[in-house]
Image (cartoon, rainbow, N blue to C red):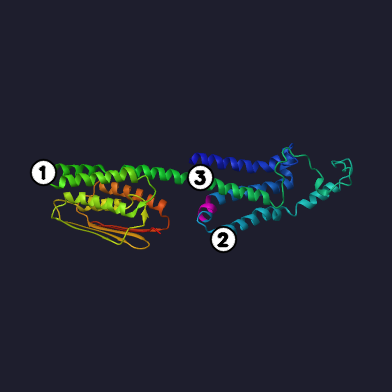
Amino acid sequence: MKNRNLWVNLLIGLGLLSIPILTSPDFSSFKEMIKAVGFQRNFLGYFLLLVFYYFNYYLLVPNFYTKKKRFIYVGALLLCFIVVTYVPDLLFQNLDFPQIQDSIGRPEGKGMLPPNQGGPPKPEEFGRRQPLINVFEIRDSFLIQFITVTILSILLRLDNQLKEIQNEKLKAEVNYLKAQINPHFLFNTLNSIYALTLKKSDQAPWAVLRLSEMMRYVVTESHSEKVPLEYEIQYISDYIELQKLRMGNHTDFTFEIKGNPAGKRIAPIILVNYVENAFKYGVNPDEASKIDIFINIDTKGVELLVQNKITVKLNELVEQTNEGNKNTKKRLDYFYPDKYELNIDHRKDFYSVKLLINLV
């Protein structure tokens, strides 16, 4: 995709620079064309248009137009228009008149074209020939060209940004679906259930039901853009209940939910990643553990606070956790741009996450 964008921008650049050449009256004679002051002025104008195109495409549109800083964007456009319009005139305004005077002062028959049938020739008609292509008529103000370049750069940039967002969303969804059914969690849970069945514990059917509900939620609801908040909290609760099967008396565990989730909707499985991290880092059968998970719901949204003591060797867990955090942050950026706050405190023996999402 990047190569495609590069080629499109290069072709647009070549197209803009070819316009003053193809529309020049002296197109048939390259030496005369490059010496003509009018051509030099027009070529400079289109070169400035090309610079403006790249400036608008790479800087103004992504930093001001798409971020709705419209007053700054319009001001920048006006400034660019003044530069494109008046810089060529300022550089060449004193060079046109002597050239015309030289043409007028030539004796008849020495390089001077015959007058028009309708009257004496106008100064600007001396030396003018029919251009090869007259589709783009050169105008001193460059107004039409400037508007065309502005619209073109905005449309191409927005189209590229839309494709980038779609690609990022697709990648995030793929990574997200891969991450949901964590094989370690699934194996540990199945082993716990197997141990319960060997003991003929009454908890075995309950654990199977909990795991079944979690799998159903992942399969049926994870493709939805938004789900009821109570579904998401129930998924977290089921996950925690299954994790508690492998926690002994050595774990100091707290899980609290405050507030009413009714009527609120949230992107599915966007909170559980940080809950999973607590159990990855904080459960160790050979060491005292402490995990605190708080979910607070108010009128504006939901707040998740997860804190735990790190009781396991980090080894490859750091890489797994960083990847999971990146995927979750991508989804937060996509679903809740400028509507969430995320603070992660990862120290040697302590891990804390505070996530606040505005659901209004």
**Residue at x 79%, y 52% (from the top left corner):** 97
139, 29: nearer the viewer: 139
Residue 344 image offset from top left, x and y in percent: 31, 57
Q: Quadrant of residue 14?
A: top right
Question: Residue 71: which numbered mark, if any?
Answer: 2
Q: Distance from label 1 to label 2 (Cα)?
A: 71 Å
Judged left or right of residue 243, residue 271 is right
State the image quarter where residue 288 is shown: bottom left
Answer left or right for 7 relative to 309.
right
Residue 200 in view in this figure: yes
Q: Which residues are magenta?
A: 58-63
**Within the magenta stretch, is there residue 61?**
yes
Residue on which disc 1 sits:
200
Question: In the image, what residue type sits under mark 3?
Answer: Asn
For marks 3 and 1, the one nearer the N-term is 3
Kindly identify which residue carries mark 3. 160
Q: CA distance from mark 2 to mark 3?
A: 23 Å
Give neighbour class at mark 3: few <14, some 14-19, many 20+ (Cα, 10 Å).
Answer: some
Determine whether label 2 and label 3 are within 8 Å by CB.
Answer: no
